[in-house]
C-alpha cells in the first residue's frame, strides 16, 4: 500500500519524465502575425532613404544614401539603424560592400538565432516550429514591436551570413564537450550581451587584466560595471614597502582607456560604471572627482576652448567616461538621520583611516550630484535584501545603466518590447504580448548559449545563471 509520500514521489517522477520528454521534443511555436510560405519582412512597405549625420558645425559624421527602410520607421530610427547597426564593409570578403537594407539586417540576426537554436538542439520540436519562430521574430523586429540590445545588431550573424571573422581569445560554452573553451573567431560565437559586471582584486595584474577585458567588451559594443572597493587607498602600505598610488590614480587609467575605445567600432562611446563603498579611504576624492574636473572644464571654456562634450575642454579633463555610483548601506543612512559619525577603513587591515560627520559626507554627495549629476547612489542593503539568488554571493555593483544588479563576473542580454504596439483600439492585446514574451525569452536564451564572453568566469556564470533582461 502506497503512502502519501510514495504518491508524491511517483508524481514527482512523472513530472520529471514529462520535463525530459519535452526537452527531447523541443518547443512548439504558433503563428500569430505571419503565414507559412510568406516572407514576414514583406509585411512592410519600403522606400529608399538617405541617412546623413552631422556635427554642430555642419561637418558630416556619417552618410549613407539610398538605404532600404520600412516606410513606417521614423528618420531617427533610420539614422540609428543605418549608422550604428548596418555592417559597413567586409560582406563576403568585399571591403567595400556593406548592408544597405533593413531586410538584410533583420534577416542576419533572426536567421542566425534560428540556426543556433537548431544547432544547440532542444529548442524547436520540428523544422516547422523553427520556421515559425524565425518568421515571428523577423516580424516583431521589422515592425518595431521589439528590438535587441546593440551588441546583437553589431555582431550576430556576421560570420554565419557574410563570412566575417575577427580576433579570438574570448570564451564560450562548447555543447560538444560541455566545457568553456577559447574562441578562435570573434564572430562565430559573437558577443551578444550588452551588460556586464566584473570584479577586480587589490593586485596590479588584476587591475590591468580588467583594463584588457573592458577593452574587449567596449570593442564589441557592450558596457561594464565594477566595484573598486577592494583596491587599497593612497594612505595604505604596500607589502614591498612604500605606500599605494591609490584608487583614484587607477581610476584615471580606466577613464582614459574607456575614452580611447569606440564601442562596437562605431561613434558610440564606451559605457562604464564605477562603484565604490562608502567606507573606502578615498571616498571624499571619489565623491568630488567629477565636479572638480567640471570646474576645470568651465575654466578652459571661459578661456575660449570649445564647450562641446567632444571638444578640447572636456577631452583635457578626467572622469568623463564613466557613471560613478556610491554604495551606501542602511548603517550610513541611519548615521545621516541621527547626525552620527561615519568612518572610512583600510582595505588591508580594517583599521579606521578617518572619521566624518555622516551629514557632511551626505552634503558633499548632494552638492557634487547637483554640480555634475554624479555620483549616483546604490542602496547596498536594499539591493542585497532583494537578491534573487541570495545563497550564491553578494551583489556589489551594477552595469553602466544600473538596471542590471547581480553577481560579479556575470552578463545580461537585453531586449525591449514596445508596449504601445500591443494596443489596438485602446485595448491592450494580452495574448499578443504573451506570445511575444515567450518568443523573446527563447530568443535571449539561445543568444546567451551561442555567445562569447571576455573571461572563463563570465562564460561559466552566464551558462549557469542564464541572466536575461526583457
Image: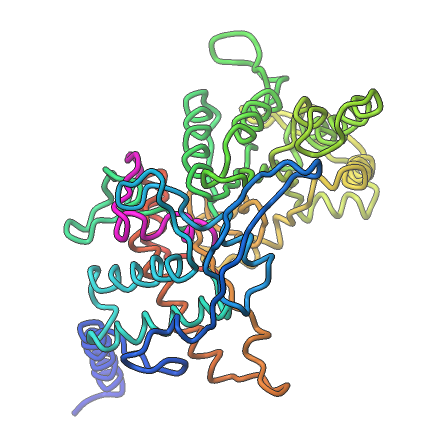
Residue 73 position in % (x across, y down): 55, 65
Q: Is residue 15 left or right of residue 202?
A: left
Q: Quadrant of residue 353?
A: top right
Which residue is found at the position 53% from the left and 31% from the top? 258
Residue 123 position in % (x across, y down): 25, 68
Let me know if residue 257 appears in the view. yes
Q: Is residue 249 left or right of residue 19?
A: right
Q: Is residue 147 magenta?
A: no
Let me know if residue 470 appears in the view. no
Q: Which residues are magenta?
A: 149-170
Q: Is residue 164 magenta?
A: yes
Q: Quadrant of residue 137?
A: bottom left
Q: Is residue 323 left or right of residue 163?
A: right
Q: Is residue 324 left or right of residue 27?
A: right
Which residue is found at the position 53% from the left and 68% from the top? 71
Residue 461 position in % (x across, y down): 35, 49
- Which quadrant does the N terminus fall into? bottom left
| Colouring convention used in this rendered image of the protein | rainbow
As rendered, which of 148 and 60 lies closer to the eye? 60
Residue 286 sits above or below residue 217 on the image? above
As rendered, which of 326 and 129 lies closer to the eye? 129
As rendered, which of 182 and 389 lies closer to the eye? 182
Amino acid at each position: 500500500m502506497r503512502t502519501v509520500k510514495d504518491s508524491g514521489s511517483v508524481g514527482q517522477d512523472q513530472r520529471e519524465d514529462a520535463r525530459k520528454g519535452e526537452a527531447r521534443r523541443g518547443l512548439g511555436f504558433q503563428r500569430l502575425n505571419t503565414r507559412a510560405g510568406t516572407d514576414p519582412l514583406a509585411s512592410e512597405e519600403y522606400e529608399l532613404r538617405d541617412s546623413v549625420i552631422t556635427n554642430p558645425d555642419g561637418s558630416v559624421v556619417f552618410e549613407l544614401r539610398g538605404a532600404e527602410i520600412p516606410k513606417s520607421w521614423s528618420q531617427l530610427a533610420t539614422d540609428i539603424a543605418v549608422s550604428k547597426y548596418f555592417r559597413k564593409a567586409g560582406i563576403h570578403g568585399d571591403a567595400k560592400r556593406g548592408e544597405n537594407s533593413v531586410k538584410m539586417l533583420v534577416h542576419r540576426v533572426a536567421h542566425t538565432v534560428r540556426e543556433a537554436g537548431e544547432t544547440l538542439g532542444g529548442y524547436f520540436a520540428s523544422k516547422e516550429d523553427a520556421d515559425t519562430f524565425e518568421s515571428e521574430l523577423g516580424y516583431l523586429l521589422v515592425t518595431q514591436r521589439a528590438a535587441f540590445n546593440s551588441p546583437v545588431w553589431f555582431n550576430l550573424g556576421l560570420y554565419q551570413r557574410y563570412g566575417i571573422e575577427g580576433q579570438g581569445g574570448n570564451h564560450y560554452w562548447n555543447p560538444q564537450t560541455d566545457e568553456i573553451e577559447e574562441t578562435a573567431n570573434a564572430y562565430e560565437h559573437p558577443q551578444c550581451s550588452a551588460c556586464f559586471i566584473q570584479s577586480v582584486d587589490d593586485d596590479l595584474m588584476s587591475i590591468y587584466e580588467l583594463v584588457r577585458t573592458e577593452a574587449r567588451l567596449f570593442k564589441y559594443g557592450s558596457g561594464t560595471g565594477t566595484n573598486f572597493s577592494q583596491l587599497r587607498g593612497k594612505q595604505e602600505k604596500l607589502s614591498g614597502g612604500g605606500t599605494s598610488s591609490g584608487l583614484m590614480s587607477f581610476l584615471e587609467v580606466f577613464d582614459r582607456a574607456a575614452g580611447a575605445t569606440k564601442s562596437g567600432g562605431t561613434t558610440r562611446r564606451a559605457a562604464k560604471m564605477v562603484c565604490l563603498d562608502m567606507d573606502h579611504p578615498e571616498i571624499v576624492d571619489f565623491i568630488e572627482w567629477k565636479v572638480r574636473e567640471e570646474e576645470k572644464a568651465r575654466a578652459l571654456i571661459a578661456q575660449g576652448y570649445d564647450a562641446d562634450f567632444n571638444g578640447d575642454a572636456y577631452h583635457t579633463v578626467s572622469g568623463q567616461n564613466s557613471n560613478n555610483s556610491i554604495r551606501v548601506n542602511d548603517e550610513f543612512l541611519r548615521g545621516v538621520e541621527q547626525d552620527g559619525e561615519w568612518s572610512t577603513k583600510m582595505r588591508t587591515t580594517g583599521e579606521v583611516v578617518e572619521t566624518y560627520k555622516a551629514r557632511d559626507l551626505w552634503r558633499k554627495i548632494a552638492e557634487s550630484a547637483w554640480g555634475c549629476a554624479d555620483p549616483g547612489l546604490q542602496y547596498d542593503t536594499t539591493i542585497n535584501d532583494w537578491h534573487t539568488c541570495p545563497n550564491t554571493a553578494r551583489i556589489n555593483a551594477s552595469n553602466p545603466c544600473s538596471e542590471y544588479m547581480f553577481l560579479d563576473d556575470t552578463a545580461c542580454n537585453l531586449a525591449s518590447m514596445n508596449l504601445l504596439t500591443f494596443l489596438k483600439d485602446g485595448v491592450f492585446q494580452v495574448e499578443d504580448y504573451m506570445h511575444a514574451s515567450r518568443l523573446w525569452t527563447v530568443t535571449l536564451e539561445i543568444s546567451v548559449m551561442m555567445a562569447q564572453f571576455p573571461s572563463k568566469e563570465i562564460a561559466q556564470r552566464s551558462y549557469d545563471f542564464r541572466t536575461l533582461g526583457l
